[in-house]
Image (cartoon, helix red, strand yellow):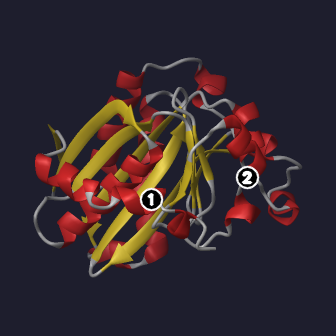
């Protein structure tokens, strides 16, 4: 397969980034764009909340409002995520659901293997931990989430290369039972950044490793492209949804 790859490192706010990801899924489903991988940043730092989560159970709402950190709900499942503008890259991929991708767990394994292979290129041993995590030295460095619509999927996820873990811990709320099931007492104990493992890595080096990693995991020929006017226009029609308190606080 051929995989279109978009490097989008200038940074956009959380509402636009989620609108663009949804627009890519919509346009791919309509046959208007090819299979697409996008690597991007949030600017400013922000929080996304999984589609099925209750806001007040997932984030420290008072702290977010006090610190002025924007947040929205995703169309994908999974848990709440802090996106550090200076310490995290996000990937998204839209693909047809066929072959091994028809099985949800197997699709997570295949797509997340792109992250495992990217980290291997940087000299870091990583492993996939079902359902949707990547671990380094037994701690989480990446999480992913997915949604499926009419034969196509959108999966997006994180790579924490230098995330401010103190800020992450202040923004997110994790149930004690979930932490205990992972054998830790705090969110901070559960996660690790690439910088902690091998030191600072440039965004360009990270992006190149991700392109190569996903090309391998998806057995794809990657070619570089940019977001089109059609894609940005489609996102502009969706962005207000992600700003709407009715959407954000639907649970």
* Horizontal side of residue 155 vs 23, given as left or right: right
Pointer 2 or 1: first along the chain: 2
Query: Residue 111, labelled with which disc?
Result: none
Residue beneath the point at 34% across and 31% down: 9
Decide: few, some or many residues near mark 2? Use Cα within 10 Å; few <14, some 14-19, many ≥20: some
Q: Position of residue 43 (x, y in %)?
A: 46, 33
Quadrant position of the N terminus in the picture: bottom left
Decide: few, some or many residues near mark 1? Use Cα within 10 Å; few <14, some 14-19, many ≥20: many
Residue at the farthest bottom position = 150
State whether residue 138 is above or below residue 176.
above
- Secondary-structure class at tag 1: helix
* Horizontal side of residue 161 vs 59, given as left or right: left
State whether residue 22 is above or below residue 189.
below
- Secondary-structure class at tag 2: helix
Given residues 251 and 22, the one toward you in this image is: 251
State whether residue 187 is above or below residue 154.
above
Q: Position of residue 204 (x, y in %)?
A: 35, 23
Quadrant position of the C terminus in the picture: bottom right
Disc 2 from disc 1: Cα separation: 17 Å
Q: Position of residue 198 (x, y in %)?
A: 59, 21
Residue beneath the point at 55% across and 61% down: 132
State whether residue 225 is above or below residue 245.
above
Query: Residue 61, labelled with which disc?
Result: 2
Residue beneath the point at 28% across and 65% down: 25
The image quarter containing residue 19 is bottom left
* Horizontal side of residue 251 vs 51, given as left or right: right
- Report the residue marked by disc 1: 242
Q: Is residue 110 visible?
A: no
* Horizontal side of residue 81 vs 118, given as left or right: right
């Amino acid at each position: 397969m051929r995989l279109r790859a978009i490097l989008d490192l200038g940074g956009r706010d959380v509402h636009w980034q989620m609108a663009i990801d949804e627009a890519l899924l919509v346009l791919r489903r309509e046959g208007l764009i090819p299979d697409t991988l996008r690597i991007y940043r949030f600017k400013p730092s922000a929080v996304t909340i999984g589609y099925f989560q209750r806001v007040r159970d997932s984030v420290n709402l008072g702290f977010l409002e006090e610190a002025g950190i924007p947040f929205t709900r995703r169309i994908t499942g999974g848990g709440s995520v802090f996106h550090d503008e200076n310490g995290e890259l996000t990937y998204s991929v839209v693909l047809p659901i066929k072959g091994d991708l028809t099985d949800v767990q197997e699709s997570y394994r295949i797509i997340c293997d792109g992250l495992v292979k990217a980290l291997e290129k940087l000299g870091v041993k990583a492993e996939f931990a079902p359902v949707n995590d990547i671990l380094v030295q037994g701690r989480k460095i990446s999480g992913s989430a997915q949604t499926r619509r009419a034969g196509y999927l959108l999966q997006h996820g994180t790579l924490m290369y230098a995330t401010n873990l103190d800020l992450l811990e202040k923004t997110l709320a994790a149930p004690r039972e979930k932490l205990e099931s992972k054998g830790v007492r705090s969110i901070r104990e559960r996660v690790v950044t690439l910088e902690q493992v091998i030191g600072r890595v440039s965004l360009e080096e990270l992006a190149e490793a991700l392109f190569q990693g996903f090309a391998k995991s998806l057995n794809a020929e990657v070619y570089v492209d940019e977001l089109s006017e059609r894609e940005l226009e489609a996102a502009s029609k969706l962005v207000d949804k992600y700003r709407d308190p009715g959407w954000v606080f639907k649970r």
